[in-house]
Image (cartoon, rainbow, N blue to C red):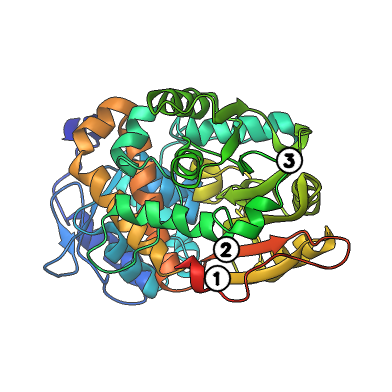
Amino acid sequence: MTTLHHANETHTATRLPAGPTIAEQLEPIVRQIFRGPPPVPVEFWDGSRLGSGDGGRIIVRDVDALRRIIWAPGELGFARAFVAGDLDATGDLAELLRAVMSTGGGGGREALMAIPAVVRAAKDLDVLGSPIAPPPEEIVPRGVRHSIRRDRQAISHHYDVGNGFYEMVLGPSMTYSCARFVDDSTTLEDAQAAKHELICRKLGLDEETFRSASAGGRPRLLDVGCGWGSMAIHAAVHHDVDVVGVTISDEQAAYARRRVSDRGLADRVEIRVQDYRTLRDGPFDAISSIGMAEHVGHRRMRGYFDTLSGLLRPGGRLLNHAISSVGGSRMAKRGFVHRYVFPDGELLDVARTTLEMERTGLEIRDVENLREHYPATLRHWVANLERNWSDAVRLVGDGRARVWRLYMSGSINAFDEGRIQLHQVLGVRPFEDGRSEMPPTRRGWD
């Protein structure tokens, strides 16, 4: 056996007899997968290579990559190989993925059709072997989908991996949602503040008529899925409101409470570990739901908005900021995102979101698509991760860091190409006489 070292892991590869290179033996299969020569260089564990180009390249580091793809054909096998380090990539991973997917490769239909040929080649190479256990970062959720218990499991899988890791990736703003870049020179931190400010203005937190209609004292804001507390802190500091933030991540809540205390806001901002389904202490003057609806699910979306709408006073506003897709979509059960990133995640069509909000008595007053801002946000996060790769691996392990690199790089392309989008939908609960107290134009929002 000969030993290969990469990315803080050790792999063993079978020492093959002299003869054709791995690239020569696999070229027919690779050409079938990509419908011609590979669009990017592909390098194998013996040093041989297929394809050409001056940019990044795909590296097949170990025969286990073939085994994983054979035993889990399609996207899941490729993802397992990448997370385990059997497949690697140099250069801009988003660009590599875009090139691969443009040919139908990377786990598409052509890759599935090539599986019999891959199996034959693996037998010829005497590397077929038995199935390999998935990387430990993979999860298969148990229990009733979107039950309180299963949702806590899914949220913990993604968010409770260590706040230090999120600090490294997200930067000082500690905000894990699409930012708003006012111009090309805007920093990530300023762009996140601009997003929070836009939401506060849409919610009317500074409008005289809105504040005078509140129950007395400072207006109350509910931030559902409050994360590490960034929106709650921004609203309290810049708009003189009291805030209740709820999350079902223990690590997020602990971190958010420390931030609130450090800013001297403990009498203004309350952070709770609480599921939205158990909220009872309305009314609130405004509600922000930022990156939360994706975790709720199609079947529970009506109940979600019904709960939130019932917590609003007349004239109160709700803003839902969420990733969307045309027609809506669930994460495929054998897909990378479901198994490694967002278990049970679901995206709604923006039309479905507005319909469900309307059915709860909310009047839709504004819809805005921030799609182009999300790939810009993701590129900052990817750059942060890659710049601090060694520290990231030290904090969460090589596999988890690889999950994030793959997930964020693939998401850049999905947003760039319009396959997924980011919508803010603003609704108001009218007074009984039909008044909304909404401003006549959007002029005060920018």
Secondary structure beneath dot 2 equals strand
Q: Is residue 97 left or right of residue 229?
A: left
Q: Which residue is found at the position 64% from the left and 63% from the top?
A: 426
Q: Is residue 299 left or right of residue 319?
A: right
Sequence-wise, which precedes: disc 1 or disc 3? 3
Mark 3 and mark 2 in contact? Answer it, CB < 8 Å.
no
Q: Quadrant of the C terminus?
A: bottom left
Front one among 215 and 68: 215
Measuring from the top left, give residue 418's x and y in whole percent: 48, 73
Measuring from the top left, give residue 250's x and y in whole percent: 54, 24
Measuring from the top left, give residue 265's x and y in whole percent: 47, 28
Circle 2 is placed at which residue position? 424
Circle 3 is placed at which residue position? 145
Q: Is residue 151 left or right of residue 62?
A: right
Q: Which residue is found at the position 44% from the left and 57% from the top?
A: 195
- Real-space Cα separation, disc 3 to disc 2, in angstroms: 26 Å
Front one among 444 and 64: 444
Circle 1 is placed at which residue position? 368
Q: Is residue 142 visible?
A: no
Secondary structure beneath dot 3 equals loop
Q: Is residue 226 visible?
A: yes
Mark 2 and mark 1 in contact? Answer it, CB < 8 Å.
yes
Residue type (three-letter) at the residue carrying disc 2: Gln
Q: Is residue 147 above or below residue 428?
A: above
Residue type (three-letter) at the residue carrying disc 3: Arg
Sequence-wise, which precedes: disc 2 or disc 1? 1
Measuring from the top left, give residue 177's x and y in whole percent: 46, 51
Secondary structure beneath dot 1 equals strand
Residue type (three-letter) at the residue carrying disc 1: Glu
- Real-space Cα separation, disc 1 to disc 3, in angstroms: 30 Å
* Identity of the residue furthest to the right in this view: 432
